[in-house]
Image (cartoon, rainbow, N blue to C red):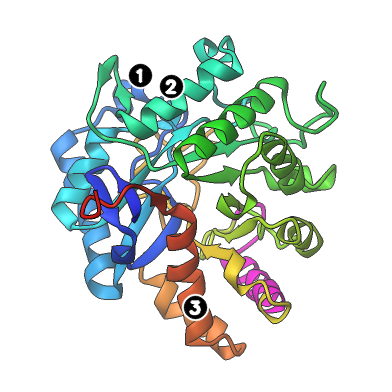
């Protein structure tokens, strides 16, 4: 029996509906949870996020959101569960960490691959821990993240492992592969597009996962289209992995949403024409709520909060259809592919 492991429990995979494979219901850079200016009115925050999610579900048929927020960037298991209850949306949480330069708290930097593996497995099979307390809410996938992104972004230097991946990131990736293989879940990744200047970060992540025995068909390599890197994507697609088209309507390292959307659409059509339609997923990478202090030059307002969920169908899908993308291809990208990748096989209770 194949299921999606949501924060409210396992759901038959066929009930996924339209899936967004990389989103953030509640998001804050490490340390934001300590800032009194960012303190939550919890009930109001749940209502605010739930209203957005509900509109997306009712107006456009979204059925599942994969919340890719790692523990040190504001992962709040009860918050996700309360939004799921209020909206009827399937919410899949993740375990894993943000890039070493921005995340991976000191405590976890001291852990071995084996200890990290057990942490991920515990999140996936027993329940996530929040503020020193165990919760009953389980993660359903793992996030790995690499890149030199920081307050002053620049490409990652060559690491001691011969890749542009830091030593502790390497350890986390190996643990993620071992945990995902044991549980049978997916791994979805974050890269910094600046690293394309020095390497193919998609391939580097995938190589480590494969060294640990990970099934490439259960790996989604994120941010591959920001901006589109066709050669890099073909390299990992030929290795059996999947790529994620994200930042729809959200310019990142690009001057405008229009410029990025058009470039991504052109690249997507080329990959579809090349026969890779069953290895692509689609998402916004949207922040539904980002508690924070005021906007400053040092901490500018980003655009991940501004795009509406309706944009997918008022702008993006029409753009694709104007280029000849069919409903069948959209069904694969938005439903069939993410459903297959994020599904976990569990014993059938009826058969048992």
Tag 2 residue? 31
Residue 174 image offset from top left, x and y in percent: 63, 29
Name the quadrant containing residue 52. bottom left
- Is disc 3 placed on a helix, strand or loop? helix
Q: Nearer the viewer, mark 1 or mark 3?
A: 3
Tag 3 residue? 330
Q: Left or right of 195: which side holds 130?
A: left
Q: Nearer the viewer, mark 3 or mark 2?
A: 3
- Residue at 30% x, 23% y is 130
Residue 207 visible in the displayed image? yes
Residue 293 visible in the displayed image? no
Residue 268 image offset from top left, x and y in percent: 65, 73
Give the Cα distance between marks 3 and 2.
Answer: 39 Å
Name the quadrant containing residue 46. top left
- Residue at 75% x, 36% y is 154
- Residue at 36% x, 71% y is 310
Residue 32 image offset from top left, x and y in percent: 40, 26
Q: Left or right of 318: which side holds 351?
A: left
Q: In which quarter of the image is the N terminus?
A: bottom left
Q: Residues within 10 Å of mark 2 (few under 14, many from 20)?
A: few
Tag 1 residue? 34
- Residue at 24% x, 38% y is 79
Q: Where is 103 relative to 264, above or below?
A: above
Taking depth in this image into account, of 251 and 331 the one nearest to the observer is 331
- Boundaries of the magenta span: 252-271
- Is disc 2 placed on a helix, strand or loop? loop
- Is disc 1 placed on a helix, strand or loop? helix
Name the quadrant containing residue 151. top right
Give the Cα distance between marks 1 and 3.
Answer: 42 Å
**Residue 334 colored in magenta in the image:** no
| Mark 2–mark 1 CB contact (< 8 Å) | yes
């Amino acid at each position: 029996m194949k299921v999606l492991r949501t924060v409210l429990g396992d759901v038959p995979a066929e009930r996924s509906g339209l899936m967004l494979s990389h989103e953030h219901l509640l998001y804050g850079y490490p340390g934001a949870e300590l800032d009194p200016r960012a303190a939550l009115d919890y009930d109001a925050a749940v209502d605010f996020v739930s209203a957005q999610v509900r509109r997306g579900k009712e107006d456009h048929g979204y059925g599942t959101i994969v919340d890719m927020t790692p523990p040190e960037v504001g992962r709040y298991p009860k918050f996700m569960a309360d939004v799921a209850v209020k909206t009827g949306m399937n919410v899949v949480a993740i375990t894993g960490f943000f890039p070493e330069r921005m995340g991976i708290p000191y405590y976890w930097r001291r852990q071995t691959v084996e200890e990290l593996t057990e942490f991920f497995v515990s999140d996936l099979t027993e329940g996530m821990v929040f503020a020193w307390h165990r919760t009953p809410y389980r993660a359903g996938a793992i996030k790995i993240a690499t890149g030199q992104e920081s307050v002053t972004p620049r490409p990652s230097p060559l690491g001691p492992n011969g890749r542009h991946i830091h030593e502790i990131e390497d350890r986390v990736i190996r643990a993620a592969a071992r945990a995902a293989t044991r549980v049978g879940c997916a791994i979805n990744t974050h890269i910094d597009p600046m690293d394309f200047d020095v390497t193919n970060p998609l391939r580097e992540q995938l190589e480590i996962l494969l060294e640990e025995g990970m099934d490439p068909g259960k790996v989604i390599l994120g941010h591959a289209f920001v901006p589109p890197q066709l050669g890099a994507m073909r390299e990992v697609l030929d290795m059996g992995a999947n790529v994620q088209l994200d930042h729809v309507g959200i310019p990142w390292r690009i001057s405008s949403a229009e410029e990025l959307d058009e470039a991504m659409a052109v690249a997507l059509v080329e990959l579809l024409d090349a026969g890779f339609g069953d290895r692509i997923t689609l998402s916004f990478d949207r922040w539904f709520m980002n508690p924070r202090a005021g906007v400053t030059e040092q901490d500018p307002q980003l655009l991940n909060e501004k795009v509406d969920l309706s944009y997918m169908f008022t702008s993006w899908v029409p753009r694709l259809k104007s280029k000849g993308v069919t409903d069948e291809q959209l069904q694969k990208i938005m439903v069939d592919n993410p459903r297959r990748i994020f599904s976990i096989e569990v014993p059938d209770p009826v058969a048992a």
